[in-house]
Image (spheres, rainbow, N blue to C red):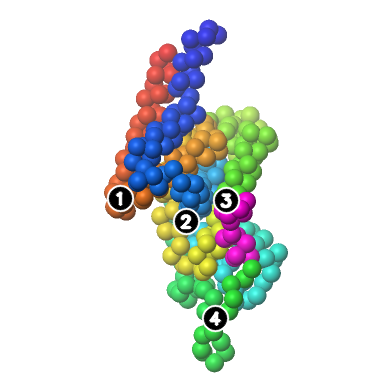
Amino acid sequence: MNRPAVSKQWLHSPFTRAFAALLLVVVLGIIFNADGAFFKWGTHRDMLRHVSVFGILACGMTLVIITAGIDLSVGSLLGMVAVAFSIVTMQWGWSPGIAIPACLLMGAAAGALSGGLIAQFSIQPFIATLAMMVFARGIAKWISGGQKISTAVRQADGAYAYVPAPEIFDRLNARIFGGNVAVVTIIFLACVLVSYILLSRLRWGRYLYALGGNEAAARLSGVPVKAMKILAYAVCGFFAAVAGICQAAQELQGDPEAGASYELTAIAIVVIGGTSLMGGRGGVGLTLLGAMTIGYLQKILSINAVGEATRLMLTGVIIIGAVLFQRSSRSRGCGS
């Protein structure tokens, strides 16, 4: 292979495009720095803390999209787990060693159920996860009674008494390394590492890529297609549970409405990173770049006092632009 061909392939690689998008947003932050606010570490620290929950969801979404699927239920699973975690720790007094595994199992089981419906009954991922999105939100409202679960605990006589927040909430919401890094950011990076190992170092990862590339060929090659679909959605549900626990800790409550529309941001992060919605291509490293891009974009708009409506419209435009750019790059690649 000659050197110009290698250079051209590198220029059109998903990593290069995702990094260029991130670099462009950072340059915009340098230009529109809000009187130097962009150059303060606190701005970057807060951006990382804010985007971490979305990034955790995006890690699971990456696995699902690589299989040519989609999961619309992650936001509702986040809300369900946030409520459940708040109930068992604040009201029932469960220790973190029991509460955290139980809530993670809840998320993984819900994801596995969606995967099972898709794999066993050939239900479209959009429909199956849409049903799970509604179902999980209903569970969140049912077990919470439609109210936020906080440190105000109802007593036997009907009165409310405030109890101290469980220590695990303070630990998850803390900052480490001299207050410079939020614990939730470390959890996000750990999720990125776990996803990377699963996709790049384990046989399961190769199966997921094969499934997304060509399901029929993967089945003929001996890939356990049904099991891999269930695995992808179970892991996605697991990460949604992780995000739900972090969300509860950050807000010091379990809100049954938490996570509404978060699935859209998670999908945006994956798409902007460059993972193909057609399946079979992409990776969690690209998702990390996509999370940084979305995080910096929202933070720059925030420090420049841009309204939420404008932020949402810009995010929509960027998603469309990213998809069109991917398509044009693939066309150039096929024509070269």
Task: Select label 2 or label 4 by which is in front.
Answer: 4
- Return the disc, 4 or 3, that comes first in the chain's sequence: 4
Q: CA distance from mark 4 to mark 3?
A: 30 Å
- Numbered label tally: 4
Above or below, comparing residue 30 to residue 149 in the picture: above
Q: The N terminus lies in which quarter of the figure?
A: top right
Q: CA distance from mark 2 to mark 4?
A: 28 Å
- Between 52 and 47, the residue placed more toward the observer is 47
In the image, residue 285 sits, relative to residue 96, either above or below, namely above
Instruction: Return the residue nearer the eye: 39 or 199.
Output: 39
Q: In the current view of this chain or complex, which residue is farthest to the top? A: 2
- Amino acid type of the residue tagged 3 in the rendering: Val
Report helix, strand or loop for mark 1. Answer: loop
Q: CA distance from mark 3 to mark 1?
A: 26 Å
In front: mark 2 or mark 3?
3
Give the residue number, with chain letter if any, for mark 3.
181
Q: Which residues are magenta?
A: 168-183
Q: Which x, y percent locates residue 312?
A: 33, 49
Tell me the amino acid under the disc marked 1: Val
Residue extending farthest front:
35
Amino acid type for the residue under numbered disc 4: Tyr
In this orientation, does residue 237 appear? no
